[in-house]
Image: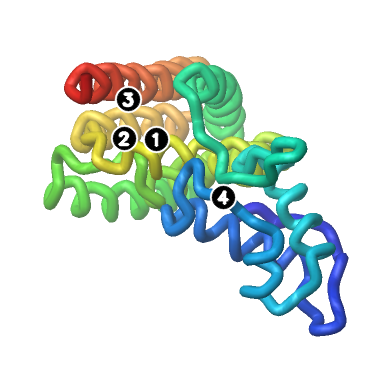
Amino acid sequence: MSKLSTKSSDSQGLTSEVIAAKLQNEIVMGILRPGDRLGEVALAERFGVSRGPIRTSLKLLSEVGIVSIVPNSGARVRVMQRSDARALYEVRAALEAEAAMLAAQKASTKTTSRLGELLGQHAGEVQEHPKGAYLQAEGDRDFHLVIAEIAGSPIIERYLSRELYPQLSLLRVKHRFVTGRGAEALWEHQRIAQAITQNDPEVAKRLMYNHIRNSWGAIEAQLTEAERGSE
């Protein structure tokens, strides 16, 4: 969840930051869907605040990239276009490949234990649903954020968690029934983890880059198939 930073509030004490966090959670969870209108009056009534904090909250979510504000039209949950998603995955591939390389340079015995435990948990989940949306689940995100944390780069970790992942959640909400790669993704994660724990930065970087590109390739192919099916 993005940690938004405004302290604007009304007489009842709800800050714009708190309201924005609540709305962001609803967007990420799919309660508020892409294209849904976010009316200031309705939201002000819902949260029991004036329109000022609501306006600030929507501006914060617009800066994160998950709300679109159109002059004279208002705010809506952003609709993620394919070109936007492709661009995000390109940035993700570059950032996470760098994170994997840095993590491999700094990996320790503790790193091996941590990644092993996490992937063991994922293996059980994938075994139950081998073609499920593993790549789009919270656990997958945790794996990547753990690597970013091990890498020791606050900038990469912050950008992934506060901007990139919230935006990608819009794609996942819109296409929630797209099948995941399941076992293939887990295998790729295991190879990445092995390269990191063996302190092999170049291999870790290459494997992570290919993993993210494979993820996008699978999503794009299935989106194309879904679009053809709806014609």
Real-space CA distance between mark 1 and mark 3, rounded to the nearest whole angstrom: 23 Å
Q: Nearer the viewer, mark 4 or mark 3?
A: 4
From the viewer's perspective, is 104 left or right of 71? left
The amino acid marked with disc number 2 is Gln
Dot 2 lies on which element?
Answer: helix
Residue at the image position 70 percent from the left and 36 percent from the top: 70
Farthest bottom residue in view: 12
User: How far, Cα to Cα, is label 3 from label 2?
Assistant: 21 Å
Compute the Cα span from label 4 to label 2: 41 Å
Q: Amino acid at mark 3?
A: Ile
Quadrant where the image shows the C terminus: top left
The kind of residue on which mark 1 rests is: Ala
Question: Do labels 3 and 2 touch, CB within 8 Å?
Answer: no
Residue designated by label 4: 37
The residue where tag 2 is placed is: 190
- Reading the image, the residue beneath label 3 is 219
Are the residues at dot 4 and dot 2 in contact (C-beta closer than 8 Å)?
no
At which x and y percent is residue 176? 31, 42
Amino acid at the residue labelled 4: Arg
Q: Residues within 10 Å of mark 1 (few under 14, many from 20)?
A: many
Q: Identify which residue is drawn at 51% across, 48% down.
A: 36
